Image (cartoon, helix red, strand yellow):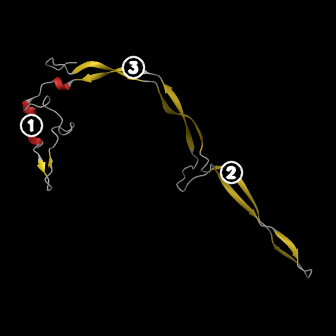
Amino acid sequence: MVDEDGNLQWGSDILVIEPEHDRPVVTGHEDDLSKPIYDVIRHVEETTREVTDEDGNTSTVAGRDIVTYETTTTQSKDDDGKLLYHQMDVIGTETVPESRYYKPNPVMETIPPVKAATDLYNKAYDRTPITDSEGNIYTPSALFSIPAGALIDHLLAV
């Protein structure tokens, strides 16, 4: 691809080869048994028993409670009415075969720098070195996306 002046903006496409690899995939779902699925009602039946003391007197006393649980078909809900039933993903692996594709090769550095654009940039973003209170000198990055100290002579007109 070329710009309006015929300068090349993109080089030859780059061949990318991704080797065969395994990746995680959801293969199914299972119940999250750490949370109740249905409401369970606890029933307690109080019992009594008759006891006779050593003098032969008989009296009725409380016995052991009979506790039963009833599972309903009503799903459990939280205070906001949201169902407490949850499923968990079952994770497996899937083999992805080797793939080959081409991606564009940007060669924007071949576009000649524009002195007027560089001057405008320098007005907006001061790049003079800064000295802090401890005497350390910091030089701001010449461009936003380029680390400080990187060569940019081929990008900016000086």
Q: Give the mark, 2 or 1, whose residue is nearer the N terminus.
A: 2
> Can you say which quadrant of the picture contains the C terminus?
top left
x then y, percent, for residue 131: 12, 51
Helix, strand or loop at label 2? It is strand
Neighbourhood count class around disc 2 (C-alpha, 10 Å): few under 14, some 14–19, many 20 upward? few
Alpha-carbon distance for marks 2 and 1? 74 Å
- Of tags 2 and 1, the one toward the viewer is 1
* For residue 157, side relative to residue 86 (left or right): left
Considering the image in quadrants, where does the N terminus appear? top left
The residue indicated by pointer 2 is 72
Residue at 30 percent across and 20 percent down: it is 14
Q: Which residue is mark 1?
A: 120
Residue 23 position in % (x across, y down): 48, 31
Left or right, 69 with respect to 97, comes to: right
Residue with the mark numbered 3? 100
In this image, 24 relative to 52: left or right? left
**Within-10-Å neighbours for mark 3: few <14, some 14–19, many 20+:** few
In 3D space, how far apart are the residues under numbered discs 3 and 2 (Cα atoms)?
56 Å
Check the image and name the residue furthest to the bottom: 55
Q: Secondary structure at mark 3?
A: strand
Vertical order, 124 against 54 (above or below): above
* Residue 154 pos. (x, y %): 14, 28
Q: Residue at x 80, y 67 (%)?
A: 47
Name the kind of residue labelled 2 in the image. Answer: Thr
Q: Is residue 52 above or below residue 96?
A: below
